[in-house]
Image (cartoon, rainbow, N blue to C red):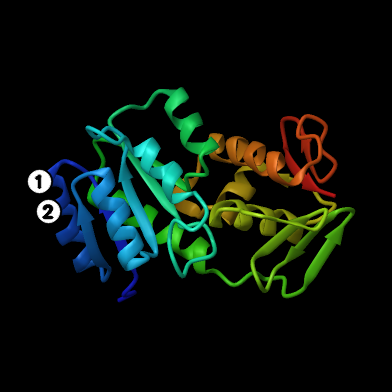
Amino acid sequence: MSGETILLIDDDATLCELLTSYLQTAGYRMVAAPNGPGGLRLAAETTPDLVVLDVMMPGMTGWEVCERLRGKDALPGRHDPIPIIMLTAKSEELDKLRGFRLGVDDYVSKPFSFAELAARVGAVLNRARSIPASTHTLTSGDLTIDFDGHHVTLRGQSLELTPTEFHLLETLTRHAHRTVPTEKLLVEAWGPEYAGEIEHVKHYIWTLRKKIEADPGNPKHILTERGFGYRFE
């Protein structure tokens, strides 16, 4: 039993009730809200370990809630970005791209099985609480990575990386100066349940580059070996 707190924000009362029961059985402490404002209040009150957030809600959409949760001081007492899994009835690429740009950690399209979502919840939480294999500080040019503190700075300025972005960066640095095949990177950084979903890697490489590279279009740290994978220099 993990005991971690999950906040579910969805206006579908039946889904909330069933999913809450299922995840409680899996060992999680569940809190739920039927709308965005209620979800933001619960997030501030409970400081959950992960948020499962529906996109299509009346009033305040999931995108707006996500932006608020990603804002500074959104969750008192929590200094690192909270992991977020988005739920949506849509599967259009533009929706996924929007989620990736907002720093969403995973994206599950409805309809989905509860077992699938539970597996994704476990994988995202594992990335958020994982202890990096590297236990030191790495400096490359104006980029500094503190693996122990899960902290990254660029030119002395602190960067806000999501758990997924940091885990991807840690995985790349563990293989520094060696090209990591995309599928291998996917399995190591996300987990075996993500096998085949190479778009995850492409999108998060881009969001990571936008944060750590002076010029994301001409990267110096994360290089692409076309048709094969990525390399950290």
The residue carrying pointer 2 sits among few (fewer than 14), some (14 to 19) or many (20 or more) residues within 10 Å by Cα, namely few
The residues tagged by marks 1 and 2 sit, at their Cα atoms, a distance apart of 5 Å
Q: Amino acid at mark 2?
A: Glu
Dots 1 and 2: beta carbons under 8 Å?
A: yes
Quadrant of image for the N terminus: bottom left
Report whether residue 197 is seen: no
* Nearer the observer, 206 or 161: 161
In percent of width and height, residue 27 lies at 26, 71
Left or right: where does residue 143 sit relative to residue 40? right
Label 1's element?
helix
Disc on res. 179: none
In percent of width and height, residue 15 lies at 15, 46
* Nearer the observer, 126 or 115: 126
In the image, residue 221 above or below residue 157 = above
- Residue drawn where x is 81% and y is 51% of the image: 178
- Residue drawn where x is 46% and y is 23% of the image: 94
Left or right: where does residue 3 sit relative to residue 99? left
Label 2's element?
helix
Q: Residue furthest right?
A: 141
- Residue drawn where x is 27% and y is 68% of the image: 28
Where residue 60 sits, quadrant-wise, is top left
The residue carrying pointer 1 sits among few (fewer than 14), some (14 to 19) or many (20 or more) residues within 10 Å by Cα, namely few
Disc on res. 17: 2
Q: Amino acid at mark 1?
A: Thr
Q: Which residue is mark 1?
A: 14
In the image, residue 28 above or below residue 57 = below
Report whether residue 138 is seen: yes
* Nearer the observer, 28 or 81: 81
In percent of width and height, residue 233 lies at 85, 50
